[in-house]
Amino acid sequence: MFRHVPNALTALRLLLAVLFFAMLTYYQYDVSGRQLLSLNIAFAVYLVALFTDFLDGYLARRWKVEGVFGRIVDPFVDKVLVLGSFIFFAGKNFTIPQLNPSEIPTNVKTITGVVPWMVVLILGRELLVTSLRGSSEGSGVNFAAVFSGKLKMTLQSITILIILVYVNYRWLIIAHHVDDIASTIRDGFIWLTIGVTVISGISYVRRGIALYKGAKEAH
């Protein structure tokens, strides 16, 4: 009975991801804060998803029921949540029109601090590591996650949470004149996440090269 609970939580997190993205789709930035209902729901759903991510891993280890489903689907759902979040954050729903003196929109900026090239970098890193892992494990070589990869995932999840808090409460932040501080904290976590993402990607590439050379020498 208990052995199915972690897998059920993983499946639930995938459904939560669908609901999360649906709420982000309905959201459209409004400086007055009047359109925050869908974002509030998205924020709550993301918190529940983070909790289930912790809980399913904890229960699987505690009950010793870790299986193939969890090893495959759990990281897949994590990547869907992370990559999907950053894609939405760089999209039109989170942009603010910049007006010139004639009140004509001339350009836009993102309220989240996330821009498209960051999404491309994060996505590129994930595709590269997935390719390296698939190639190595297809050859019978273990390519388990390293510390930098786990740190990267943790930072990405925290950064998404910080961005959601910032956007949710930006109207309050502006009202109390602390936007400079809040946006600096937001951007600091974004850049820290980008840095760790790059470093972890390099670590995996170096590891892949070492495994390839070892396999070549063995033959």
Image (cartoon, rainbow, N blue to C red):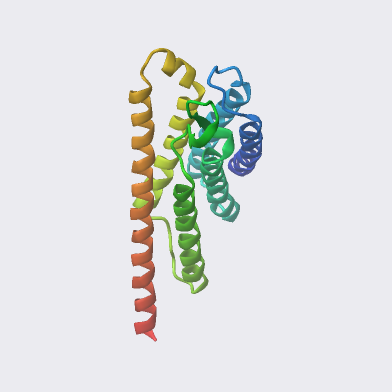
* Relative height, residue 1 to residue 45 (above, below): below
Q: Residue at x 55, y 18 (%)?
A: 33
Residue 180: give x, y in percent of width and height.
Answer: 34, 24
Query: 98 left or right of 13?
Result: left
Say which quadrant the C terminus sits in.
bottom left
Say which quadrant the N terminus sits in.
top right
Residue 62: give x, y in percent of width and height.
Answer: 48, 41
Of the pair 74 and 4, the residue shown nearer to us = 74
The quadrant holding residue 24 is top right
Farthest residue in the front direction? 102
Query: 210 left or right of 62?
Result: left
Farthest residue in the bottom direction? 219
Of the pair 216 and 23, the residue shown nearer to us = 23
Residue 59: give x, y in percent of width and height.
Answer: 52, 39
Residue 182: give x, y in percent of width and height.
Answer: 37, 25
Query: 207 left or right of 89?
Result: left
Q: Residue at x 50, y 53 (%)?
A: 123
